[in-house]
Each structure stands twice: as C-alpha cells, then as structure tokens.
Image (spheres, helix red, strand yellow):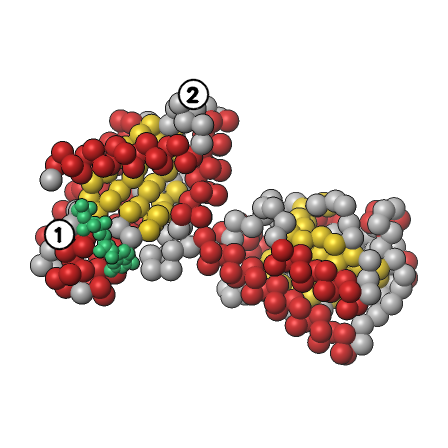
Amino acid sequence: MLIPEKPDNEVSRIDTLRSFNILDTAPEERFDRLTRLAKRIFDVPIALVSLVDVNRQWFKSCMGLSVSETPREISFCGHAILSDEIFTVPDTLADERFFDNPLVTSDPHIRFYAGCPLTVPNGSKLGTLCLIDMTPRDLNEDDRKLLRDLASMAEQEIAAVQMATLDELTLLSNRRGFEVLGQHALNVCKRINKPASILFFDLNKFKKINDTYGHAEGDYALKKFSEILRLIFRDSDVISRLGGDEFVILLTNANYESSSEVIRRLRQKLDEYNKKAERGYDISFSVGQIEYDSEKHASLADLIQEADAAMYVKKHTKH
Ligand SMILES: Nc1nc2c(ncn2[C@@H]2O[C@H](COP(=O)(O)OP(=O)(O)OP(=O)(O)O)[C@@H](O)[C@H]2O)c(=O)[nH]1
C-alpha cells in the first residue's frame, strides 16, 4: 500500500480548510443533493464529499457509507488532492498502490475509485467529490466532464459556507461565524480551566456619521474600527461584527481585569486614530464586559445577552 504524500502547500491548505469552519458540522442538504445526484448519474453505490484533514478524511456528505471519517493514510482522496486532474483507480486489485489497502481488503471492499479535487479560490485542494464502486470500471470523457461539473458545484457550496460566516464589509466573523467559533473557544477554556471574557461593543452616535457624511463614510468608519480591533486583540480572540454598529469579542485566557486592560489599550489606539484622521467626527464606543462563569452562563448566547445588557447600562449612564 502506498501512503499518500502531503501536497507542497500542506500547511496553508490546512489553515484554509480550518478557516472554512466546515469540519465536523452537521450534514447539509446542499451537499447531500450533489452526492445523491452523483450516485444516481454514475450508478455507483457510494458517492462522497470528502475533506482531507491533517490525519483523517472527513465526509461532509456521504451517500452509501455509514462511517463519517477514515484515517488519511489509507484514504484514496489523499492521493486525489495531489493533482488538478480527476484521479481514477479502475481496479484496485490490479493497482500496487491499493491492492492491500484495508478499504479494499475489507469493508467497503473498494474496487473502483474516481475523485475530482475540490479547489477553493486560493488554490488549496480541500478534498474531493468522489465515486466508489465494488466492481471494476472506468470513466469515459463525458463521465469526466460530468464529474467535474458536479465537483464545481460542490466547490461553490464550500465557498458559500465561508461567505456565510463572514461579514462582507469588514471580513470579520458575522453572528453565525461567532456562534461557531465562540462556542468552540469557550469549550476549550472550560476544558483547560482558563478564564474567558466577552466584550460587547456598540459605536456611539454612529447614525450621525451616516446622516452627516453619508453611508460610504459610515462603512469606512466600521472598517477602520474593525482594523483597530484586529490590531489590539490577539489572534486567538474571536472578533466578530454582529450587525450594524455592534461588535462582539470573546477573549480566551482573559479574566475581567485583563480584558479591562485591553479596553484601555483600545481606547488609546482609537484616540490616536481620531486625532490623526481628522474626518470631522470621532469613532467612539460603549462596551459591556462580562467574565465567563460556567455555573451562570449555560451557553454563549447567555453570555452575549448579558454583555449586551451591560453595554446598554454603560451607554445610558454615559450619554
Ligand atoms: N454605513 C453603514 N451604516 C449601517 C450599517 N448597518 C447599520 N447601519 C446604520 O447604523 C445606524 C445605527 O444606529 P443606532 O443603532 O441608532 O446607533 P447610534 O447612532 O450609534 O446610537 P447610540 O448607539 O445610541 O449612540 C443605523 O442608522 C443603521 O442604518 C452598515 O453596514 N453601514
């Protein structure tokens, strides 16, 4: 058996895969529709959307197979992502790379494999749309075109997954992205017994910026504020724009005091920016600050709600 090699861009490929927040998510109809279609069109018992992770291939959609992942070392898709072309193995038993592969010698007894790599806009091949049969066969030129078309539909769905978790204006996570990443970060802090804190920001008098200088200037202010947040917070903090002029940040390994210190630095940076920018208005914010307490906050949503309420109190005692 030949263990698949790693692509040259493996590190950035894995970073890209992780950034899509798609691994270990629930099955989705938009992917299942494609694998169902592939299974029917090609008359194969198994069709998969497989994503090649560090040590495993994980199936975002899986028709005709009951497992959700297998080790990368024995995966066919690990080979398929090494090239831009469709990778086919017409008869596994006649192929020295696969004849003794456990997926061939035992369940599901693969005899035929065809996988079309799924490439995302930065060029990383995250996985494949693949067909599996228990009898030898091959694809003709028309079949290949068809498989490529289905794969490009899967690629579009994967790109849509990313857009659905990003705020288009600021490219920060949106509410949906924050819910996924924030919950994950909270679970990690809880597991390793480290504090976490949440900050809920609402810009002050933002409507006035729009009304006085126009919507484009309002957008510019939102983007500038996002840039400054990115500068001040750590990579491990989850920064998100919930919508409008509301931003929320989950700080990992930070208690109330350390998050107060970060707010102080943020104010300082924003002051510097306002002085230098001279755009006729200042960007300023009100912030609600809550330290996570697993006894009190059953979910991330509870934490967001409490931080929002704390922000509201701050805003209305200041203005
Ligand atoms: N430019 C721009 N404006 C937006 C966007 N999303 C929401 N808004 C506007 O943001 C404004 C938010 O107004 P409010 O929630 O009243 O907030 P505010 O004027 O900051 O008032 P206070 O928070 O009480 O100081 C509304 O006028 C929205 O139309 C956006 O993406 N771009």
Q: Residue at x 40, y 47 (%)?
A: 175
Residue 174 shown left or right of residue 245 in the figure: right
Residue 272: % across, % down:
14, 49
Q: Quadrant of the C terminus?
A: top left
**Whether residue 102 can be seen here:** yes
The residue wearing badge 2 is: 295
Q: Is residue 47 above or below residue 107?
A: below
Residue 256 shown left or right of residue 137 in the figure: left
Q: Is residue 96 above or below residue 256?
A: below
Q: Mark 1 belongs to which amino acid? A: Asp
Q: Mark 2 belongs to which amino acid? A: Glu
Residue 237 shown left or right of residue 246 in the figure: right
Residue 316: % across, % down:
16, 37
Counting the numbered discs, the total is 2
Q: Residue at x 36, y 36 (%)?
A: 304
Q: Earlier in the sequence, mark 1 or mark 2?
A: 1
Q: Residues within 10 Å of mark 1 (few under 14, many from 20)?
A: some
Query: Tag 2, which secondary structure?
Result: loop
The residue wearing badge 1 is: 282
Report whether the residue tagged 1 is closer than 8 Å to ligand 1: no
Mark in the foreground, 1 or 2? 2
Q: Hey, which quadrant is residue 288 in on the image? A: top left
Q: Residue at x 12, y 36 (%)?
A: 318
* Observer-nearest of 69 and 153: 153
